[in-house]
Amino acid sequence: MIKQEHFILTGAAGKVISGDLTFDDALEIKGTILFIHGFKGFKDWGAHNLMASYFAQQGYRYIKFNLSHSGVTQQQPNDVTDLQAFAENTVSKELADVQTVINYISHTYTSNQLYLIGHSRGGGLAILTAANDPRISKVVTWSAIADFSSLWKPEQEEEWKKTGKIFVENARTKEKMPLNISLLEDFKEHEDEYNLLNAAKKVAIPWLILHGDEDVNVQFSVAQQLAQAQVNAQLQKIEGANHVYGASHPYTEPSLPPQLKEVYEKTLAFLT
């Protein structure tokens, strides 16, 4: 039977990390998958819960969590509503959260293989983690970025430095969401360390890069850049797929959209 359990951890700056794990208690666990959501995303977005159950049915323990400064709260788990936390987010805080969750997994569960999956900006976090953390056995990136600074426009930086804040739009709600200057300052301070193409060169474990060729948020050419940086990575194109492989939020269908199902099948084959 498919079961879901929840956990709470203390994340960056004392903010809460809420997470869950999905598994089938009738199956022997083959390994643990840790999923990292992207920018403006969260663990219960769209088809994420459905995807978790698909992997659980194949004998995997599937763990996903909300980054502490995602802007999603325990009280309102299906939307970004804590805009103060969202504004205060940085790459350093996200990386610290990922390490907190990996430490939790390592201390809580017997040492099966640990696999990372990251979507979009979460893919960037997965690349950095895979390059530096020997506890990771394999990594899969879905629609991953290749540069954290691609999340804002270069011409916004001058305004950002003057006012201390810029705004990005939530495409679904049209809400203007703030980003504090601390995000830019943190990136500039760690620009070499957080260079994703350099990190890609250091990934020594098996790596599958999946990307839709109709992704307008992160172009398919970005996946090609990552694959060129790490020649041992496998790049597979998802034909006709957008940034979220046909999913949407909320997602109420009983099965995955066809392109996301292809992502699942390719990921499963790679991990098996």
Image (tube, helix red, strand yellow):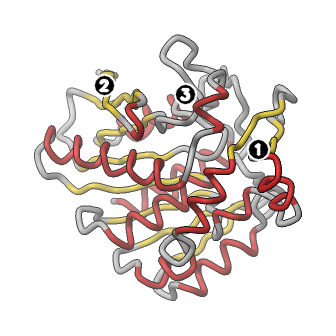
Residue plotted at (61% across, 50% down): 182
**Camera-side mark, 1 or 3:** 1
Horizontal side, residue 2 vs residue 39: left or right: left
Circles 2, 1 touching at the beta carbon (< 8 Å): no
Q: Which comes sooner in the sequence, label 2 or label 1?
A: 2
Nearer to us in this view, 262 or 243: 243
- Element type where label 2 sits in the image: strand
Kindly identify which numbered label has been placed on residue 185: none
Q: Secondary structure at mark 1?
A: strand
How far, Cα to Cα, is label 1 from label 3?
Answer: 28 Å
Q: Label for residue 165?
A: 1
Callout 3, which amino acid? Asp
Residue 44's disc number: 3
How far apart, in angstroms, are the residues tagged by discs 2 and 1? 33 Å
Neighbourhood count class around disc 1 (C-alpha, 10 Å): few under 14, some 14–19, many 20 upward: some
Earlier residue among tags 1 and 3: 3
Residue 70: quadrant of the picture: top right
Q: Nearer the viewer, residue 8 or 221?
A: 8
Task: Give the quarter of the image for residue 207.
Answer: bottom left
189 up-or-down from 11: above or below: below
Q: Is residue 145 visible?
A: yes
